[in-house]
């Protein structure tokens, strides 16, 4: 039917990126995933590494207090981590050279802006007296997960556009 290709070596539309380049779509996805993995290592892991090393140092003390997950999260400055990741993703979305996948990227960018506003609001009161550390830890972990999903998708979409 309409799927037969001429024998002249032409590639199908599925093998060509949206921009018309000759890079296969599977290779573009692979490159975008590799860049997403690098983003995760350098932006996410290194952002929470100081808290993890502080936790390990506390374990070496004689009378150390072993905090629970939420208490540890409340001391991790995860709001600041979320703010940095989200601001970076918003900047990446606005500075990309191509304008493909506009609807999907617009959704994640709006989500990132709302996320940044919420995280900024919560971070402003994080050091106030009487804050429930467990509740703050729960909130910061939920927001970190939401931030990782939204900024991860934003990064992936932008890198996929560049790879095509």
Image (cartoon, rainbow, N blue to C red):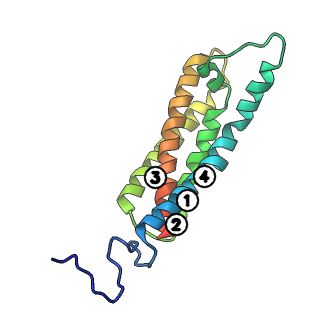
Crowd class of label 1 (few under 14; some 14 to 19; many from 20; radius 10 Å): some
Q: Do residues under tags 2 and 3 come within 8 Å of each other at their CB atoms?
A: no
Closer to us: 124 or 53: 53
Q: In x, y percent, where is residue 126?
A: 63, 26
Relative to 63, is 40 on the left or the right?
Answer: left
Q: How far apart are marks 2 and 3 (CA)?
A: 12 Å
Q: Mark 4 points at which residue?
A: 39
Q: Earlier along the polypeptide chain: callout 3 or callout 4?
A: 4
What's the distance in space between the residues labelled 1 and 4, CA to CA?
12 Å
Residue at mark 1: 92
Q: Residue furthest left?
A: 1
Label 1: element kind: helix
Q: What whole-number distance in Å separates the C-alpha atoms at marks 2 and 4?
A: 16 Å
Above or below, 114 against 1 in this view is: above
Confirm or deny contact between disc 1 and disc 4 (CB under 8 A): no
Are discs 1 and 2 less than 8 Å apart at CB? yes
Distance (Cα) linking label 3 and label 4:
17 Å
Up/down of 14 relative to 61, above or below: below
Residue occupied by mark 2? 96
List the single residue furthest toward the front: 7
The quarter of the displayed image where residue 21 is located: bottom left
Labels 3 and 1 touching (C-beta < 8 A): no
Q: Residue at x 61, y 35 (%)?
A: 79
């Amino acid at each position: 039917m309409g799927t037969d290709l001429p024998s002249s070596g032409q590639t199908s539309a599925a093998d060509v990126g949206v921009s018309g380049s000759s890079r296969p779509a599977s290779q573009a996805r692979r490159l975008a995933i590799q860049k997403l993995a690098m983003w995760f290592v350098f932006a996410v892991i290194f952002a929470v590494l100081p808290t993890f090393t502080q936790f390990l140092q506390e374990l070496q003390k004689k009378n150390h207090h072993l905090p629970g997950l939420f208490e540890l999260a409340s001391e991790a400055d995860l709001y600041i981590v979320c703010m940095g990741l989200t601001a970076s993703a918003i900047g990446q979305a606005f500075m990309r050279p191509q304008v493909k996948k506009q609807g999907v990227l617009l959704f994640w960018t709006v989500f990132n802006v709302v996320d940044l506003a919420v995280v900024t609001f919560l971070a402003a009161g994080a050091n106030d007296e009487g804050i429930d550390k467990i509740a703050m830890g729960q909130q910061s972990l939920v927001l970190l997960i939401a931030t990782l999903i939204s900024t991860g998708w934003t990064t992936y979409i932008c890198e996929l556009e560049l790879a095509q």
